[in-house]
Image (spheres, helix red, strand yellow):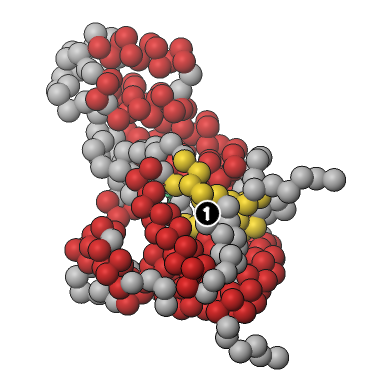
Amino acid sequence: MTQKRVRVFSGARPTGKQHLGNYLGAILNYVEMQKDFDCIYSIVDIHALTTVETTLQLKENCLDMALDWLAAGVDPEQSIVFIQSHVPQVMELHTLLSMVVPMGKLTDLPTFKEKVRMHPQNVNYGLLGYPVLMSADILLYKAELVPVGIDQAPHLEFTREVVRSFNYQYNTQVLLEPQMKNTPVMKVLGTDGVNKMSKSLNNEIEIAADAPTTKKLVMSMVTDTNRKLRSDPGNPDICNVFSFHKMFSSQEEIGMIDVECRRAGIGCVDCKKTLATNINNAMAPFRERRHEWMKKPKQVWEILYNGADRARTIADVTMAEVRDAIGLPRYR
Ligand code: ADP
């Protein structure tokens, strides 16, 4: 008999084709966690609506994201992979949870304040309720563990508080307090060398990009800005290209660059050429798999529909328990 494994939930907004930051900071961890946990991975399209300007790209973005996940090794046989809105129960739970969440708690959250600063033209109710919907995502599936970096710990703490308030208010134990699965926060910088790699900053390298495009982007990367001439010694410690070498190059190459850059034995152009080759080599199998999946979008949608079916089965049980706990009249 197989032992019941701990259930993990994680969601990501459908931002379309994923970049190296997403890949190294999140997707590889998704793949890794499958070894030890029962994972539920959600493409949280409703969350995307809070700040989105147009929904024209939404379906395509969901598909692109699924393609990246599948090609990276997220296994739909093993994990539940689905689109958030395909399990509408999450919106029902969101409303029910909202009754135990004090308004002030939401308006005080630094993330809300930040979003208001970023989108002053569109401070909608959904933006305020975002953490409640996030709690519903986790609680609907009774996830025991949620992978978060230390910087996101307050979000999970919010969910835990919601559970305590709900269970206390309705004198129940139906909702499960999720634990934080502490994951190392990896911050991959973009091609500008200073900011976190992000689509909105236009400094990203998409993982699905072909080899020449990747090379072009790598060649545009900002290096140690103090190094003006080829003959100037560089400092790998403050060079983003070197950070990438540490992730994609062999120990031998890393050691060589560390020494040669400091004594101007290697120039930035050669250093970047090597990096481009190594990134392209490392991503080649991924790109090949993605290409194969791309040829069968129907099958990918089918995977997402099946994932939603599996997720809905869990959601139905939770919602029946939640409704009973609150004391809502049953319906046929
Ligand atoms: P979301 O709004 O869903 O967090 P993002 O695209 O910002 O969407 O991030 C998706 C995942 O990828 C998150 O887990 C985030 O931490 C990770 N991620 C995004 N950008 C980077 C980056 N530059 N370095 C490391 N991890 C990143």
Local secondary structure at mark 1? loop
Look at the picture and state if 278 lies above or below 18. above
Q: Nearer the viewer, residue 218 or 246?
A: 246
Residue 150 percent across, percent down from the top left: 38, 42
- Which residue is pictured at 46% across the width and 32% down the height? 279
Q: Nearer the viewer, residue 317 or 101?
A: 101
Q: Is residue 284 visible?
A: yes
Which quadrant of the rendered structure holds the C terminus? bottom right
Residue 138 percent across, percent down from the top left: 52, 61
Look at the picture and state if 239 lies above or below 18. above
- Which residue is pictured at 28% across the width and 14% down the height? 261
Q: Which residue is mark 1?
A: 178
Q: Is residue 287 visible?
A: no
Left or right: where 87 falls relative to 219: right
Which quadrant of the rendered structure holds the N terminus? top right
Q: Residues within 10 Å of mark 1 (few under 14, many from 20)?
A: many
Q: Nearer the viewer, residue 183 or 308?
A: 183
Left or right: where 75 falls relative to 66: right
Quadrant location of residue 272? top left
Quadrant location of residue 223? top left
- Which residue is pictured at 23% across the width and 18% down the height? 235
